[in-house]
Image (cartoon, helix red, strand yellow):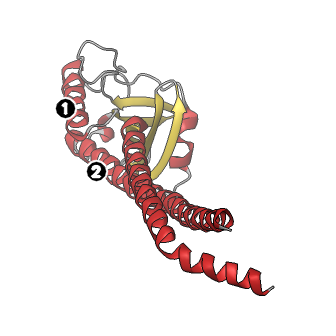
Amino acid sequence: MSEKRKNNRHSIVFIWISVISLVSGVATVLFTIILIFNLSKNYLNAADARLLMAAEMSSEIVGPDYHNQIIDSTSISQEKFNFIVERNDDLCRRLHLQYLWSVLIVEDQFFFTTATHSDIEDPTSPVAAFFERHQDPESFKLALESEMKPVFSTFDNEWGKGRMVLVPRTDENGRTYIFGASIQMSEYNALILKAALTSLTIGALIMGGAFLLAFTFARRFTNPITRLIETANKMA
């Protein structure tokens, strides 16, 4: 009879531990999912706000009349264009951005009017030339359909995985020009991964505490339940 009583007690302990561990595990997973969702949304909103601010600041660097005077590749001196590139590079470094640029649409062609170096930490790295034709006009399609409102989007291309904003405007000649800013998603993804690992670590600690609590609780209260089961069996 003592062996049977011992088995009953072990069964009850196992049930308590299993139930509490399962509840703790489900709660941890749900909490992690909700946390990642909220953090993703907040981080993305913060990134979009930074991108829009950078695009607006890049516009202020050249001034409101900059695109009005552009006709062809000789409209802006190389010295002035280099100065703009340097200012954009500095702005990218301070705001932890990837690129800043602008394009002007002339006869359905997109031409660079401002740019940054391909590596903002290296002033000798390649940079788009003034009035150089942009090779990917499709990337501006959303901006042209936005009724002159900023458009945010993600991209995965030869420049990496990132997020960008396009801010379309019109000069006094009725031509559309677009300021753009982009950010690499690696920083964003690293923050999300760090938050997820932190949440899972906390969940694992909670599950460990719940396991010990369940084991202690079960050992303390299984004896009366076991005796009740034995009494019921005898009566049966």
Q: Amino acid at mark 1?
A: Asp
Does residue 176 appear anywhere in the picture?
A: no
Q: Residue furthest bottom?
A: 235
Q: Is residue 130 above or below residue 166?
A: above
* Nearer to the camera, 217 or 75: 217
> How far across and down, in percent of the image, does residue 216 sit?
44, 66
| Number of other residues with Cα within 10 Å of mark 2, as a class: few under 14, some 14 to 19, many 20 or more | some
* Nearer to the camera, 69 or 26: 26
> How far across and down, in percent of the image, does residue 93 sit?
22, 33
* Side of 123 where 149 appears, left or right: right
Residue at 27 percent across and 44 percent down: it is: 59
Quadrant for the C terminus in the image: bottom right
Q: Is residue 165 above or below residue 8?
A: above
Q: Residue furthest right?
A: 236
| Number of other residues with Cα within 10 Å of mark 1, as a class: few under 14, some 14 to 19, many 20 or more | some
Quadrant for the N terminus in the image: bottom right
Residue at 46 percent across and 72 percent down: it is: 220
Q: Mark 1 sits on what residue?
A: 90
> How far across and down, in percent of the image, does residue 71 sit?
37, 30
Q: Mark 2 sits on what residue?
A: 53
Q: Which mark is drawn over residue 157? A: none
